[in-house]
Structure formats: structure tokens, C-alpha cells
Image: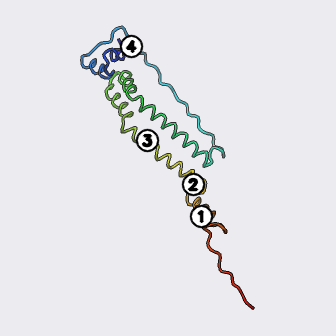
């Protein structure tokens, strides 16, 4: 049986099965060693530099999209943490496996995820502020609102100077 099947059979976590197997030096039978595969290569296509892609609005929009994608990725990582740890435990082997395993687990740890969330929140705030700056900024928006409210004839318009009346 696989570790997952054993865990389900005994209603315990897969991690508990792995710990017990390691402690008691269990040997897998009837399995073939995994063949090493070359890691996938990711090609990055740069965004072309055009007026449409370099405008402040376009940059802010791309930044917001990236922030949202990273938040989705963080959510997926957080909701599948146990499964990711199990994958790390089974996938890492060879010399220095324990150090690799610990480094990978550290990368998905709560502390790391909290720091990523903090960085994403700061990025979103910065992007929102830069989006507002493209519209003239908060100060300019307030000034425009104040000028609108102070139009002659409005409730908050300054009073008109007194009229001089001459009696001749």
C-alpha cells in the first residue's frame, strides 16, 4: 500500500505514516526507482515597449493583475500546505536530502507566506497610489472637489461682497 492508502486505512495523517516508516526503516517493495527528468524551462517574453504599455495606467493595471495572481497563488499554497509538504517529503532524495527538504518546507512556511502577503499588500497600496497620481493625485482631486463645491450660487460659496448703493 502507498503511504496515502495506509493513512486513509488507519485514519491518521500521511505525515505520521512517513515518520513511522523513517523511524522503523520501512522498505518499499515492488516499486521502480524514479527516473530523473530535466526540469522544465520557462521562457519569459518581455512586454514590448510602446506608448500603450508604458503609460502609467497600463503599468498600474499590469501591477494590479500581477498582485491578484500572486494572491491567488498564495491562497492555493495555503490551502494545500499539507499536500505540498507531503510532495516535498516524497520528492526530495539523494545526498543532502534533509537540507533540501528543510529549505523547501521553509519556503512554504507560515512566516514566509505572511511576508509575501505583507509585500503584496504594500505593492497593492503603492499601485493604487500611483494610479491616483496619474489622475493628478489625492491633493489635486480634493482641490477639484473644493472648487466644485465653492462655485457661485452653491450652498458653500463665499458670500458676495456688499453692493454699494448711492443716493443722489
Residue pushed farthest top? Answer: 30
Label 1 vs label 3: CA separation? 37 Å
Residue at figure coordinates x 51%, y 27% from the top left: 41
Q: Is residue 102 rendered to the left or right of residue 67?
A: left
Per the image, the residue denoted by label 2 is 133
Q: Secondary structure at mark 1?
A: helix
Q: Where is mark 4, residue-wise?
A: 33
Along the polypeptide, which appears first: circle 4 or circle 3? 4
Mark 1 or 3 closer to N-term?
Answer: 3
Check disc 3: other Cα within 10 Å, few if <14, some if 14-19, many if 20+: some
* Residue 49 at x, y percent in the picture: 63, 43
Location of mark 1 (residue): 146
Q: CA distance from mark 1 to mark 4?
A: 73 Å
Q: CA distance from mark 3 to mark 2?
A: 24 Å
Q: Residues within 10 Å of mark 2 (few under 14, many from 20)?
A: some
Q: Earlier in the sequence, mark 3 or mark 2?
A: 3
Locate the C terminus and report the quarter of the image it occupies.
Answer: bottom right
- What distance separates the C-alpha of mark 2 from that of mark 1? 18 Å
Residue drawn at (63%, 63%), measured in percent from left and top? 148
First in sequence: mark 1 vs mark 4: 4
- Where residue 63 sits, quadrant-wise, is top right
Q: Which residue is mark 3?
A: 117
Q: In terms of image quadrants, where is residue 35?
A: top left
**Residue 102 point in image, percent of width and height:** 33, 30
Horizontal relation, residue 52 to residue 110: left or right: right
Amino acid at each position: 500500500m502507498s503511504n496515502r492508502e495506509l493513512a486513509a486505512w488507519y485514519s491518521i495523517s500521511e505525515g505520521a505514516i512517513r515518520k513511522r516508516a523513517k523511524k522503523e526503516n520501512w522498505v518499499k517493495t515492488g516499486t521502480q526507482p524514479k527516473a530523473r527528468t530535466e526540469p522544465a524551462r520557462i521562457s519569459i517574453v518581455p512586454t514590448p515597449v510602446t506608448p500603450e504599455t508604458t503609460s502609467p495606467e497600463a503599468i498600474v493595471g499590469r501591477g494590479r493583475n500581477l498582485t491578484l495572481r500572486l494572491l491567488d497563488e498564495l491562497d492555493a499554497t495555503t490551502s494545500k500546505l499539507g499536500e505540498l509538504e507531503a510532495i516535498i517529503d516524497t520528492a526530495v532524495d539523494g545526498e543532502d536530502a534533509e537540507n533540501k527538504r528543510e529549505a523547501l518546507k521553509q519556503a512554504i512556511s507560515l512566516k514566509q507566506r505572511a511576508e509575501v502577503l505583507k509585500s503584496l499588500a504594500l505593492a497593492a497600496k503603492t499601485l493604487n497610489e500611483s494610479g491616483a497620481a496619474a489622475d493628478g493625485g489625492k491633493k489635486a482631486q480634493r482641490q477639484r472637489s473644493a472648487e466644485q463645491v465653492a462655485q457661485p450660487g452653491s450652498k458653500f460659496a463665499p458670500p458676495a461682497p456688499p453692493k454699494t448703493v448711492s443716493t443722489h
